[in-house]
Every structure is written in C-alpha cells, then in structure tokens.
Image (cartoon, rainbow, N blue to C red):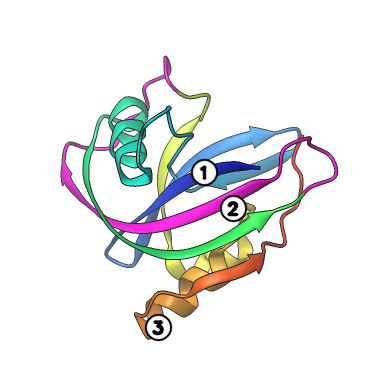
Amino acid sequence: MNVRPSLLLIENNHLLLMHYRYGDADVYALPGGNPDRGETLPQTLARELDEELGISVEVGPMVLGGEVLLDEVKNDVLHCVFHGQLVGGLPRLNPDETTALAVVWKPLNELARLNLYPNVGLFIQDWQMGGEPLGYIGKIPQVYFA
C-alpha cells in the first residue's frame, strides 16, 4: 500500500485543488504527493507544494485518513489529509513537476459534486462544520479515472 499525504488549503471558503483531465472527465486532486525515503508526511507536503506550486505552507493537524482500494490499479493508497496554511507565494503550476492543467480554488459547498481525488468532499464539508479531526474514515468510495 502506498501512502499519499495531501493538504487542505482553505481561504474564503474555497479549497485549493489541482485540475486534471482523464478521458472525458475533469478530476480535481488535493495537492500532495509521495514521500521520499526518510521524509515525514508534513515534510513531504512542504516539499511537494513548493515543487509543484511554488508555495510555502505550514502543515497543521491531520484531519482524516482512509484508503482507496481499486481493482483497476495495482497499488492501494492510504490517504492522510492534513490541514494547512499558505505562508508564502502564489500557487502556480510548475509543468516540470506536475501534469495538472491548472490550479483552482473551488467553493467548499461544491466539493461533493466534483470528481475529487481522494473522494473526500463530504468529509471535508463535515469537518468544516464541526472543526474536529475526523480520524480514520475507512474505505474511500473512489471512482477510477483512466
């Protein structure tokens, strides 16, 4: 199982997402990436967001964790979603580091209607309403986009 940390950057009730296109589907991913050997998950997030988006972030608490288990791909993924703050720079794609088409801010109330990776839009909305970390949420109901 792979581990993928990602970061919730929320400003003015909008969430920072990376926009991809798979076949006919627009897919929006939480920014994050794969840890390098010897790297903590917060260190991974700081590095990945600097490399891919040119921003500095402060990584806060983990909001939720859950697995994406898809028969279509060989590796299952444990997603660890943290809350963070933008502390420097303006998000801009670095095409040398990502295949994303754009970086976008989407309203929190639209998350449940997006093709989101990982598919945690409803969980994010619940967390925003309650403010407490959700912990382990189990299997994430994820659609596979090829």
Q: Dots 2 and 3: beta carbons under 8 Å?
A: no
Q: Position of residue 114 (x, y in %)?
A: 61, 57
Q: Nearer the viewer, mark 1 or mark 3?
A: 1
Q: Which residues are magenta?
A: 70-97
- Which of the two discs, 1 and 2, labels the residue nearer the N terminus? 1
Residue 118's mark?
2
Q: Amino acid at mark 3?
A: Met
Residue shown at 36% from the left, 61% from the top: 14
Q: CA distance from mark 2 to mark 3?
A: 20 Å
Residue 73: within the magenta?
A: yes
The x, y position of residue 79, in whole percent, is 55, 52
Q: Is residue 57 above or below residue 12?
A: above
Q: Name above or below for residue 17 compared with residue 101.
A: below
Depth order, front residue of 18/43: 43
Residue type, mark 2 in image: Pro
**Residue 29 is inside the magenta segment:** no
3D distance between C-alphas at marks 1 and 3: 25 Å
* 138 to the left or right of 46: right
Picture residue at 64% right of the left edge, 34% below the top = 21
**Rendered view: 110 above or below 59:** below
Quick one: quadrant of the N terminus?
Answer: top right
User: Which residue in the protein does label 3 denote?
Assistant: 129
Residue at 64% across, 46% down? 77
Of residue 127 and residue 12, the one placed in the foreground of this image is 127
> Pointer 1 and pointer 2: residues touching (CB < 8 Å)?
yes
For marks 1 and 3, the one nearer the N-term is: 1
Which residue is label 1 attached to?
4
